[in-house]
Image (spheres, rainbow, N blue to C red):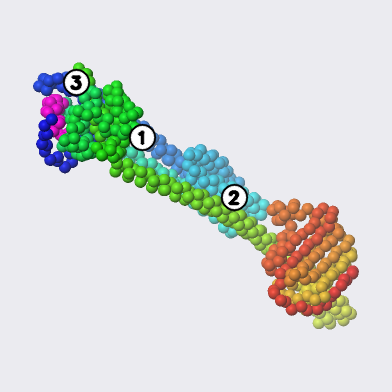
Amino acid sequence: MALTCVKQRRPGAAAAWAGALESLQPVVVPPDLNAEIVHPGRGDLTLSGFVAAACVAVVLVGAAYWLSLQQSRAAEWVSHTHEVIAAIARTRAALVDIQNGHRGFTISGEEKDLEPYRAGSTAIVTETAKLRALVADNPVQQQRLAQLEGGLAPRLASAAELIAARRQGGFEAAKTIVDTGLPNEQMANLRMVLKDLEAEEETLLAQRLVEHERRLEWFWAGITSVVALLLAALAVLYLQVRRRRAAQQALLESENRFHLMTSSVAEYAIIMLDFEGRVRTWNTGAQRITGYRWEEMIVGRDFSCFFLESDVSDGKPMRTLETAASQGRFVEEGWLVRSDRSAFWASIVMTPVRDAQGSLRGFCMIARDLSERRRAQEALEAEMRARMRIDEELQCLNRSLEALVRERTSELRGANADLLEAKARLRELSSQLISAQEQERRHIARELHDDTGQALTVIRMHLADLLRGADGATDRVPDCIKVVDAAIAQIRGMALNLRPTMLDDLGLVDALEWALERQAKAAAWRSALEADDLLPELPADIQTACFRIGQEALTNAARHAHASEVKLRLRMVDNELELTISDNGAGFDLARYRTPEERKKHFGLISMSERASLVGGCLDIDTGPGAGTRIRASFPLPAEPELVESPVAGSADA
């Protein structure tokens, strides 16, 4: 076979051939290269035009329907928003009627002035119900409506209270309530909520209208694009029909150039085989890839020389031809060998070559060396496996971190709950403390007015008689002295109740002994006081807290325990001052008294616990129904306190 010189291939020729050769279909050898070209009929163009017109009509009808739906939806949005705004306005008007009604009644006291109040109270219930139904699909408005309803109840209650005060106490009683400013503040809050509701609806309306306009813009842009695409498709279809004629003519010329073009491709091995698998022709790419030279007489040899010996023994070359002949194409990636028997990974495409009658004339084998790509793929897979391993490790670390975060979050939630509970307890204690202070002030004022004030009045009257020289005035001087003595004793008792002087003068033990003897004498107890011989010098705040806790415990025992014996013990335990008060009384259910409802009613237990905690101590109560009560308070003292001898040791019985 004579060698043929080929032209130098142009840059990019291999790339242009890559897709075409990989998707090569069975080759049909034309019987006559000069056969007449058959022109396509015009029925295809007519059908295509009809289909395009139908598509345009369907798109336009659908677009008109969609546009009508959008207009209807926008109208519904506007109507719904106006309805909500109208309901808000009616609610505001009802609130104004309520305010005007009770204001008019407060000023005039006439029942007819309450008509706006009654009408507004009825209307506001109806309007809030309508608002609830209208904003059911808006969680934000639902929250604001809940705020409105939450503020409406106290507003109506304050209005009813104002009307009741006007009816029962007159204008001055009602004016007292108005002067607190609470009705105006409640009304201002309700107006603010209504304003927020109205502003939100107006914002929603503006957003919906903007969204509607934006959809319309996208709609017309889409319609324009669809029409443009359809026109472009029709233009392309028309051009394809025109090009078909030129393509048929070009096909005849391409057959003549096929062998020249294949010989210029160096990246692909293109080998023509006869129907028995013997090599007939090949190109420069096949020579480069397989390593065979023209002088090695490769033409006429069986193409199995390109396969591994194991594949040849297994009959793979023959199966390749049979599969290509039966299925029209055979494609795989596998191992091929070069002339020096070195293996390389290649992409193989085997296509049958048939004549116009469909008879098998041979095969076209296209191979491409993929060794570099395979090595890159293996490196990429190794890298992916390494990354997956790293990802698994990161996921494991992430799970550990998430578990740690959940644990810390749980701890923080618990601490936050304890803090909130302590805050609520402090607020409750402050409220009860203020109430106790006011009650104690009322008690002191009552005693000063009823006893001391009357005594001073009597003394003043006697002194006035003595000053005028009235008959028998001198004889009443001893009575005045008795009244003065009684007043002095009463004031001294009040001072001792407020703060015993012996707590500052004699110390904690004497003050506790005085309180125990005083309560024992009043309640007819058997009492006992035990105190360590040596006690440290106590800080003033710990002395006060210890005395008040003991005083409160003795008071509770006298009021509620019905005990016959009470013991009080004061001692040092591991650098802590421990005070224990125990009785043999009725006891009580401690769990019930620690509920929020009972804590509001019983201030004594809370005050003792809070007094202990304020100085760093703690309070422990051991009791039960019928089992008596033991209260133990412990107070940590500063390091290395100086011990002093207690003035009381052993026990004191009363």
Which residue carries the number 1 mark?
70
Residues at discs 3 and 2 in contact (Cβ within 8 Å) = no
Q: Nearer the viewer, residue 553 or 522?
A: 553
**Considering the image in quadrants, where does the C terminus appear?**
bottom right
Q: Residues within 10 Å of mark 3 (few under 14, many from 20)?
A: some
Residue 611 belongs to magenta span = no
- The disc placed on residue 154 is 2
Which mark lies nearer to you, 3 or 2?
A: 3
In the picture, measured across the screen, residue 441 lies left or right of residue 385, that is right
What's the residue at 37%, 37% (across, down)? 74
In the picture, measured across the screen, residue 169 lies left or right of residue 384, that is right
Q: Quadrant of residue 632?
A: bottom right
CA–CA distance in space, label 3 to label 2: 99 Å
Q: Which residues are magenta?
A: 244-263
What's the residue at 63%, 51% (across, down)? 161
Q: Secondary structure at mark 2?
A: helix
Q: Residues within 10 Å of mark 2 (few under 14, many from 20)?
A: some
In this view, 272 is above or below 12: above
Q: Position of residue 328 (x, y in %)?
A: 27, 24
Q: Position of residue 487 (x, y in %)?
A: 81, 74
In this view, 18 is above or below 482: above
Q: Identity of the amino acid at label 1?
A: Gln
Q: Identity of the amino acid at label 2?
A: Pro
Q: Tell me if I can see residue 140 in this picture.
A: yes
Q: Secondary structure at mark 1?
A: helix
